């Protein structure tokens, strides 16, 4: 099949490369000439595992080409996928880019071709899409074409895998009177051998939105549950494992920590709250999901503050900057907010991420942030270490040597990615999320943000431990149970790994 993909970002480039991998004849179109030159030279504009190999295989087999002028690239295509950006940079949608892409390509598309919109767009825009396209065709004196959508469910870091081996394929029908569009898309995805669900285009848009809202809700739920685990001294890892065997619940997306970032989940939660308000709807659940997600960053900073014995003059090492491993994407990365807050509160923040592009971008976006090109450079002399992104190399660091290189062996694991027992054996004070019951002190107001560390009897600085009783402690005590929670930074004996 001759396919053209408009927009070569995280979604479009993966779509183009995977279609070429399936043997289709693909032209990738992008308005950014530099990006096209880089692709022609075999250099990837983004980091996505497996993508470079697919692109170079497609290019050398002659099945994948790149082009700037959209009009020419769509004229001979049987199917045109549109995967242009839709964010307004302020948590909302913008449809200007897709409108302008459509007005460039729709009049040029062949009468027997099919338009497939893959970008994530407001359901309202998707509802109007068939009329918009039909008006453009009429104006150009061309026959109507099928208008389809095909939402993507591909995660950054495993997008190639998710495209080639999806859980399901969703096909949205905007306008397809003879079923040509649906049968073309069914043919393309036949080899995936997974359920292909054909539904109205608005249903498909809500399916995409619903999936991401549910995933975001699961993460915020896990973060709320982790708070209870911290307060009662339970281990969330065991709790989630116990819950996950219930097939109604499942185990995915229940990892607590600093919360979700990236281009999809935060944007779609915020956008849904805003658009719903404009429709006169209330969304208390999604508002709570967002509030909890932002609270997690504050909790992380509070825990780091306690671990470092105050932030003023402290040196904090951040491990990881990207919103998740195996990407170089910093969009809505919690690391940026966290670094800004730490710097505002008087800390020197030294960060390391394995992705050079992410390091450069983060340094440009966060004034005062120091980035280094090796983990050890960030760790030497640190008053506390904060793990932000669970890159596998962090689990493999020589932690016993790190304990000797830091000023205070204290680590706050924002992704529950490290082995507490191993770190404690190496001499660290370890704090995760919902793992050991000792992090509950990080209540707002209980944190010494500016108090310098006080020396102990041996002259070593120890954390200032001003803290309030947590509400859980108060509730336990009201039931006659007196089990004070131990502040972090005091014990180094953690049970369960
Ligand atoms: C998401 C959706 O998963 C994908 O289907 C959609 O099409 C695009 O958006 P992506 O944003 O690439 O994918 O990453 P995802 O794996 O969903 O992770 C999003 C964020 O949630 C990351 O910051 C991750 O660290 C965080 N997360 C994920 C958690 O905090 N806990 C979890 O249990 C899972």
Image (cartoon, rainbow, N blue to C red):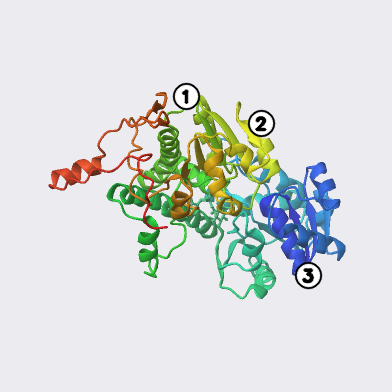
Instruction: Check residue 339 in the rendering and tell me which mark sits there, or answer none.
Output: none
Is residue 141 in sight in this rendering? Answer: yes
Estimate the x, y position of residue 191 in percent, counting from the top left. 67, 75
Identify the image quadrant of residue 90.
Answer: top right
Q: Does residue 165 appear to the left or right of 108 in the view shown?
A: left
Element under disc 2: helix
**Residue pointed to by mark 2:** 364
Estimate the x, y position of residue 431 in percent, counting from the top left. 42, 45
Q: Who's the residue at 74% across and 48% down the image?
A: 139
Estimate the x, y position of residue 31 in percent, counting from the top left. 78, 43
Q: Who's the residue at 36% across and 65% down the image?
A: 242
Assess disc 2: are there few (<14), some (14-19) or many (≥20) residues with their C-alpha within 10 Å of its C-alpha: few
Mark 1 to mark 2 CA distance (whole Å): 23 Å
- Within 8 Å: ligand 1 and the Cβ of disc 1? no
Estimate the x, y position of residue 127 in percent, counting from the top left. 55, 52
Instruction: Check residue 312 in the rendering and tell me which mark sits there, or answer none.
Output: 1
Disc 1 versus disc 2: nearer the observer: 1
- Mark 2 and mark 3 lie on one chain; the one further toward the N terminus is 3
**Residue pointed to by mark 3:** 23
Assess disc 3: are there few (<14), some (14-19) or many (≥20) residues with their C-alpha within 10 Å of its C-alpha: some
Q: Quadrant of the C terminus?
A: bottom left
Q: Quadrant of the N terminus?
A: bottom right
């Amino acid at each position: 099949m001759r396919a053209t993909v408009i927009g070569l970002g995280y979604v479009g480039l993966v779509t183009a490369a995977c279609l070429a991998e399936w043997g289709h004849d693909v032209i990738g179109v992008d308005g950014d000439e530099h990006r096209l030159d880089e692709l022609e030279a075999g250099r990837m504009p983004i980091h996505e595992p497996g993508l470079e190999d697919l692109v170079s295989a497609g290019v050398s087999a002659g099945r994948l080409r790149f082009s700037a002028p959209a009009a020419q690239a769509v004229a001979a295509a049987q199917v045109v996928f549109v995967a242009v950006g839709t964010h307004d940079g302020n948590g909302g949608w913008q449809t200007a880019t897709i409108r302008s892409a459509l007005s460039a390509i729709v009049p040029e598309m062949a009468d027997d071709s099919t338009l497939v919109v893959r970008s994530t767009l407001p359901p309202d825009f998707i509802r109007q899409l068939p009329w918009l396209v039909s008006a453009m065709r009429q104006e150009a004196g061309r026959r109507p074409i099928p208008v389809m959508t095909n939402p993507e469910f591909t995660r950054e870091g495993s997008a190639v895998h998710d495209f080639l081996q999806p859980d399901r394929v969703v096909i949205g029908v905007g306008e397809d009177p003879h079923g040509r569009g649906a049968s073309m898309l069914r043919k393309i995805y036949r080899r995936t051998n997974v359920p292909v669900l054909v539904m109205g285009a608005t249903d498909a848009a809500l399916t995409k939105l619903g999936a991401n809202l549910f995933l975001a809700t699961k993460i915020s739920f896990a973060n709320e549950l982790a708070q209870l685990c911290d307060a009662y001294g339970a281990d969330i890892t065991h709790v989630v494992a116990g819950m996950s065997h219930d097939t109604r619940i499942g185990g995915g997306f229940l990892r607590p920590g600093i919360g979700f970032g990236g281009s999809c989940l935060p944007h779609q939660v915020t956008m849904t709250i805003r658009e719903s308000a404009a429709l006169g709807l209330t969304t208390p659940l999604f508002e709570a999901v967002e509030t909890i997600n932002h609270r997690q960053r504050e909790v992380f900073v509070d825990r780091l503050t306690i671990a470092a014995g105050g932030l003023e003059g402290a040196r904090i090492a951040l491990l990881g900057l990207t919103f998740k491993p195996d990407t170089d994407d910093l969009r809505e990365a919690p690391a940026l907010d966290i670094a800004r807050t730490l710097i505002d509160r008087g800390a020197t923040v030294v960060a390391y991420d394995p992705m050079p592009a992410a390091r450069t971008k983060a340094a440009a976006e966060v004034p005062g942030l120091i980035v280094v090109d090796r983990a050890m450079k960030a760790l030497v002399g640190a008053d506390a270490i904060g793990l932000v992104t669970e890159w596998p190399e962090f689990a493999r660091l020589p932690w016993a040597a790190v304990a000797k290189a830091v000023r205070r062996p204290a680590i706050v694991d924002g992704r529950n990615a490290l082995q507490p027992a191993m770190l404690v054996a190496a001499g660290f004070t370890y704090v995760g999320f919902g793992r050991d019951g000792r992090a509950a002190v990080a209540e707002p107001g209980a944190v010494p943000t500016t108090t310098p560390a006080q020396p102990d009897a041996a002259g070593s600085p120890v954390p200032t431990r001003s803290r309030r009783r947590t509400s859980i402690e108060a509730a336990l005590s009201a039931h006659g149970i007196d089990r004070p929670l131990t502040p972090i930074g005091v014990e180094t004996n953690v049970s369960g790994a």
